[in-house]
Amino acid sequence: MTLYQPFLDYAIATLRDRLDLQPYPIPEGFERKSAIVGKGKNQEEVVTTSYAFSATKLRQIRAAHVQGGKSLQVLNFVIFPHLNYDLPFFGADLVTLPGGHLIALDMQPLFRDDRTYQAKYTEPIFPIFHHYQQHLPWGGDFPEEARPFFSPVFLWTRPQATSVVETHVFEAFKDYLNAYLNFVAQAKPIDEIQGLTEIKQAQLRYLRYRSQKDPARGMFQRFYGSDWTEEYIHGFLFDLERKLSDNAFTSV
């Protein structure tokens, strides 16, 4: 079993238990993709597997799981709410490279500087955040341009020991996910036009930033080529603009 498989298994089981989970379409060619990298004794198969679901209040729940041996393990797990809910995004980037682990967990806000929004979606998470800070200290430099898209309870850490990932990071992942699902359970639909417009604009800002700055772009290009990578990013990982242009969400 790979390092992040238990995270994925837990997430899917929890989602099935707590939500009316439905399949979300994965474009052809993206459910599984593999490539052989390296030479000779260092040759390794890299496999990327994709998962996607939806629920009553959640437009897309999706995961990309990259397995490339001990020195390359990645799980990117993101939840996008429907456009008539002011819910934040749930985001987990769990990355293992030869130099160590890069871990990012957050409830990524639609309106970071709105105090009412913070009181609703950020402040309840502070006890969880502070609990794990002692085991998962701040990971250091983070792009300034990315800061507006992350909350004050952004758990960003670079543990050296795999045992820390298997214990403290896994527990933090569980707690953040369940806290997010509590928000989902309580969420009420927004029906006034200004609020809907602001939510749509905020979601698109986030999606455009992430699709343009996706840190996995270079990795995927090396493994699978540029054409596959760009279609994977825009047609699956961050597909809202594509869906809107296809009039798939005209009711929102």
Image: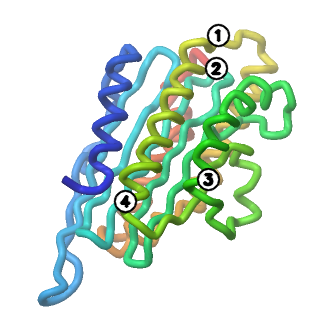
In the displayed structure, 81 sits above or below 74; it is above
Tell which tag, 2 or 4, sits nearer the viewer.
Answer: 4
Residue designated by label 4: 163
Label 1, secondary structure: give it: loop
Question: How far from the left and from the top, in percent, is residue 78?
Answer: 48, 41
* Upstream in sequence: badge 3 or badge 4: 3
The answer to whether residue 235 is seen in the rendering is no
Q: Could you tell me the amino acid type at mark 3?
A: Gln
Crowding near the residue tagged with mark 4, few <14, some 14–19, many ≥20 C-alpha atoms within 10 Å: few
Mark 3 against mark 1, which lies toward the viewer?
3
Q: Nearer the viewer, residue 3 or 250?
A: 3
- Quickly name the residue at label 1: 188
**Residue 194 higher or lower than 154, as above or below:** above
Q: Which mark is residue 5?
A: none
Pointer 3 with pointer 4, Cβ within 8 A: no
Task: Identify which residue, 95 or 21, lies in the foreground.
Answer: 95
Q: What separation in Å lies between label 1 and label 4 (alpha carbons)?
A: 39 Å
Q: Nearer the viewer, residue 35 or 41?
A: 41
Quarter of the rendering containing residue 213: bottom right
Residue 237: x percent and y percent? 45, 47
Number of other residues with Cα within 10 Å of mark 1, as a class: few under 14, some 14 to 19, many 20 or more: few
